[in-house]
Image: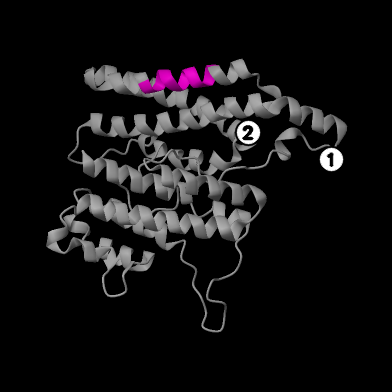
Amino acid sequence: MKVWNQADMPKKDISELIRTGDKMVELLEEMSANNEKEYQKNRNIFISEYSKWYTKCLPLIRSMVPDKATRFESLYHTNKRTGMNEYTYTVQDYIHGIYFKDKPKSYTDAIISKRIKEQRDILQASVARTSDFSFEMERFVKINPLQGLDSSAIVKQNKLIDINFFDEHYNSIRAEINTCFKQGFYMASFLLSKELIQNLLVDLIRTNFPLAGEGHRSLYYNYLNERFRGTGELLKAISEKKQDFDINPEAIDYLIELVSSMEPKLKPEGHSFGMIPKKEEIQELRIEETMDLIIEIINFIKK
């Protein structure tokens, strides 16, 4: 089987993969109008096309946008979940014929359509990265042949977060996080990311409980100390009130699981701020996925 990478895949072929992604989305969106026989026929077409598409896309994304590779893979399959809901459902679940009970098939199709759109957008980012880096990386390898390593081994990850936030202040913090990450200041990028997540959790509570007169502000603000509550306190409040959120409680549980994984287990005899994390350790924390999920829940509640 041929393994594709940036070195042997022209930009036009990447564009063709993007068009294939668009066609798969169109197929999914039209399937609900079909009768059962046509539905199964088109579903089989989707599965066949997707399997070939994913096989070609994954090595390309690992090469050109390695910062997005983990997310791209997790949309297809994941072992890091405690349960299945609309936020943890994957393309692999769909291929295996797993549907949500008491929901029409169109509900599951819509979730998968969203997963493919996100994967397509990640693939789209590789086109820009190809334009930005392909010539320089090829030239660098020719001048500096590092024991036969190709350009894909030299491409470095520049961003930890690639989200366009609804708040320009958050976008400024995102830029600072990415600058720190690019320069190798991993502790700084990690701590700033946690601060941004903490602010997003406050926004989540504010969105779901907008009436200050009902004591909701105390869920995220400590009046006695005149400060916003820390991440641990916010998670506790969200957990205790999860049945009052206008969303599936399992989504709240999954969010708490993601955020909690970022809190280090400190020992009494150690430093209070923990050890400086490595680049790989930060990438494993799924920081961008966590922020995306909070924003997605906020937008869902607003609807």
Q: Vertically, is 204 above or below 132?
A: below
Across and down, in percent, residue 32 comes to: 24, 22
- Residue 113 makes an appearance in the image: yes
Residue matched to label 2 = 64
Across and down, in percent, residue 20 comes to: 47, 19
Residue matched to label 1 = 146
Element under disc 2: helix
Q: How dense is the environment of label 1, judged by Cα within 10 Å: few (below 14), some, or many (20 and up)?
A: few
Q: As drawn, which residue projects farthest toward the front? A: 226
Q: Is residue 91 left or right of residue 155?
A: left
Q: Which span of residues is magenta-colored?
A: 16-25
**Magenta segment includes 13:** no
Q: How dense is the environment of label 2, judged by Cα within 10 Å: few (below 14), some, or many (20 and up)?
A: many
Across and down, in percent, residue 231 comes to: 38, 64
Observer-nearest of 240 and 212:
212
Q: Vertically, is 161 above or below 138?
A: below
Residue 238: image quadrant is bottom left
Element under disc 1: loop
